[in-house]
Amino acid sequence: MSDFFSQGGYAFFVWGAYGMVVVLLLIEILQLRSQRRTILARLGRLTRMPGTRTSDFGATE
């Protein structure tokens, strides 16, 4: 079992790479959730604006 965790002397690099991937994935998930909240809030404000209708969004003048 200790041979598995020592990874032939490269344990620091192997487990460090796994750790970095996990950290970066967590950061990505948190950033995506934050962006989603921001986009939904902006859409909510946009739909509550007075004088806007759904037919106005595709109109060109």
Image (cartoon, grey):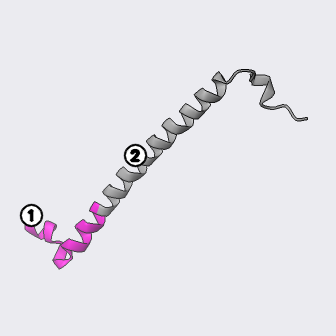
Q: Residue furthest right?
A: 61
Magenta run includes residue 55:
no
Q: Residue furthest bottom?
A: 9
Q: Position of residue 4 (x, y in %)?
A: 15, 67
Figure quadrant of residue 52:
top right
Give, as a three-letter code, the residue at label 2. Leu
Magenta run includes residue 17:
yes
Cβ–Cβ under 8 Å for marks 1 and 2: no
State the extent of the magenta-drawn residues as a range. Answer: 1-19
The foreground one among 5 and 30 is: 30
Classify 11 as above or below 32.
below
Give the residue at mark 2: 30
User: Could you say whether the residue bearing mark 2 is in a helix, strand or loop?
Assistant: helix
Give the residue at mark 1: 1
Q: CA distance from mark 1 to mark 2?
A: 34 Å
Q: Residues within 10 Å of mark 1 (few under 14, many from 20)?
A: few
User: Could you say whether the residue bearing mark 1 is in a helix, strand or loop?
Assistant: loop
Magenta span dominant secondary structure? helix
Classify 16 as above or below 32.
below
On the rendered image, what quadrant is the C terminus found in? top right
Q: Residue furthest left?
A: 2
Q: Residue sitting at 25 percent across and 73 percent down?
A: 13
Q: Position of residue 27 (x, y in %)?
A: 38, 52
Q: Position of residue 7 (x, y in %)?
A: 18, 72
Q: Is residue 36 left or right of residue 26?
A: right
Q: Residues within 10 Å of mark 2 (few under 14, many from 20)?
A: few
